[in-house]
Image: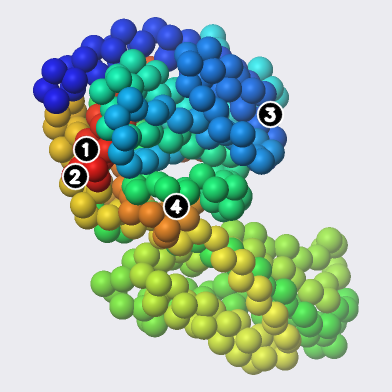
Amino acid sequence: MADLSSRIQAAAQDLAPRLASMRHELHRHPELSGCEFWTTSRLREWLTETGIDVLPLPLKTGLVAEVRGAKPGPVVALRADIDALPVQEETGLPYASEIPGQMHACGHDMHMAVMLGAAFVLKQMAPELPGTVRLLFQPAEEISEGALPMIRAGVLEGVRAVFGCHNKPDVAAGQAGIKAGPLMAAVDTLKIEVTGKGGHGAIPESTVDPIVAASAIVMALQTAVSRNTSPLEAAVISICSFQAGTASNVIPPSATLLGTMRSFNPAVRVRLQELVQRITRDVATAYGARAEMTVTAGPPAVTNDPAMADLMRAAAATQGIPVVEAVPTMGGEDFAEYQARVPGCFAWLGTGRPENWHHPRFTVDDNVLPVGAAFFAQVAVDALVKLGQ
């Protein structure tokens, strides 16, 4: 296995120019969630011309490919997301987005290049692979609507473990951030519609002002975390949109609040919904208004299986990749949907860049691409060996 590991590293380094070229091409052609048609086609071309089979699954966008080893064994999966964001790029790069208002501002172009590299390396090692590596190129991660259609299409059938990563600008380039347990939060989207009685802004006593009631709700919601959730539990409620009225002298009849709730603990997640419902209803009533709350559940928390996290740490060590303890974030990731069904681990891959995700000047470091490719090829090999024992 030591010889195989060194050949994995050498093969990944040989691919470095090609991986950078592919990432730059993907970066120039970003596509929004659910519209990744060109991206899917290009991925298919790169995989098939390398002799990697693409499975005939009923997917609108995205694809699934397999590298089958010559020896029988388990199936493990590697996942990369492929969608871009509605962000106008400001990097000035020679390969900047050619599509106005769209950009790979979260580094999914990097994720694709890393997993393509892992696939190409594994294809070279296929005669020695004790099983099958399934590659999931998933659409619509940014809107949390990509993983479940993939799962319904059967991408996890027979899969024993699943692995993925996200670039991390505040982790040094070439380092891996790994931890067992919760890494990214469960996501719930909140909509509150406050109904009052509109009227003239100069005669407020004849109205039930929904703006005042909604403002009080926003402030009161802060107590759902600060005074109703243990300080040992991480949770966030943020109201990010407040829409009401169109004129300076008219009190509107209604106001709409949009926000997000984030948590790690499933019990806290349920409790937050109950608290927000009660606070919203009772505060509105106190102001003579009425409030209706709708919660749209997103993916659960990304929670890494301890054994799979240990496997990723060992794979990183084998490839000489420094490992740091990953710091959790309240950001969400629908990779969690796979983990809800199959043991898995999601890691950070450091890029050491100044701008964070979703910024118009967001960039990644091409030097990390072969590092990531070798890392995930090694993870796949080690998982096949471990699960086949």
Name the residue carrying label 1. Answer: 385
* SS for dot 3: helix
Q: Residues within 10 Å of mark 4 (few under 14, many from 20)?
A: many
| Residue at numbered disc 3 | 37
As measured in the structure, the alpha-carbon distance from the residue carrying label 2 to the one carrying label 3 is 40 Å
- Distance Cα–Cα, label 3 vs label 1: 35 Å
Disc 1 to disc 4, C-alpha distance: 21 Å
> Which amino acid type is shown beneath numbered disc 3?
Phe
Calculate the distance from the C-alpha at mark 4 to the C-alpha at mark 3.
23 Å
Disc number at residue 338?
Answer: 4
Separation (CA) of disc 4 from disc 2: 23 Å
Q: Is residue 134 above or below residue 196?
A: above
The answer to which of marks 4 and 3 sits earlier in the sequence is: 3
Residue mark closest to the camera, 3 vs 1: 1
Residue 94's spot in the image, x, y percent?
A: 54, 9
- Left or right for 342, reference 148: left
- The residue under the point 56% across, 87% down is 278
Which residue is nearer to you in this view: 313 or 175?
A: 313
Q: Categorize mark 1 by other alpha carbons within 10 Å: few (<14), some (14-19), many (20+).
A: some
Helix, strand or loop under label 2: loop
